[in-house]
Image (spheres, grey):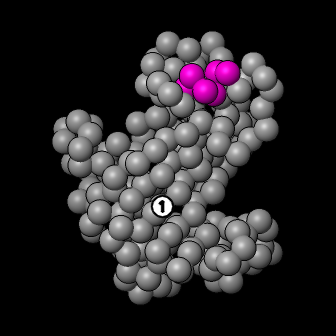
Amino acid sequence: MKILDIGCGNKKHPGTVGIDMNPLTDADIIHDLNSVPYPFEDSVFDKIIADNIIEHLDNVILVMEELARISKVGATIKVIVPYFRSKWAYIDPTHRHYFTVDSFAYFDKDHIISKLYKYTQTRFKVNKVIFNEKLKNSFIKSIVISLANRWPVRYETYLSHLYPLDDLTYYLVNLKR
């Protein structure tokens, strides 16, 4: 299985090919991630991990189109980003984008947002959206996370402004380019 870690920084996941724009990182390939095409052939990767990188890049749609191009049909794309209500989303001056539960619905052919707004031909199936998947949390926060992961849209609508969580992990499947 061939796995790409895009924007790997100095925490490249074991067993992956790392790509980053910073030459001072653990990346195997140095490339400006705002510049497409990326230096890979079509349909190379079985899985892509984008761990806290998408929010830093100029054009989310263009990046997702490129990830679709270089991944195989059926490949898993794991995207981790700060949640838009989190202070971590705004504390970093290099963040250009902020994400909600439905931010990747524009790519999911089964979601009404994708049907109403045709920004791209690239399609992913949004399999899961998880709040604070790998973060250490207090007991109270764990309860809120459990509720948020069970009813993400309700959490976002009614509770997130009172008790904001920190990040979102999207599990996407590449459907077509």
Q: Residue at x 77, y 76 (%)?
A: 26
SS at mark 1 in the image: strand
Locate residue 8: give its quadrant: bottom right
**167 relative to 20, above or below:** above
Q: Residue at x 77, y 65 (%)?
A: 11
Q: Is residue 96 left or right of residue 166?
A: left
Query: Callout 1: 10 Å neighbours few (<14), some, many (20+)?
Result: many
Q: Is residue 12 left or right of residue 63?
A: right
Q: Quadrant of the C terminus?
A: bottom left
Please provide the residue range marked out in magenta. Answer: 143-148
Residue 54 covered by magenta stretch: no
Q: Is residue 169 left or right of residue 88?
A: left
Magenta stretch secondary structure, dominant: helix
Locate residue 105: give its quadrant: top left
How many numbered discs? 1
Can you give x and y, in whole percent of width and height, for residue 7 in the image? 64, 66
Q: Residue furthest left?
A: 115
Which residue is labeled 1 in the image? 77
Q: Residue at x 78, y 23 (%)?
A: 139
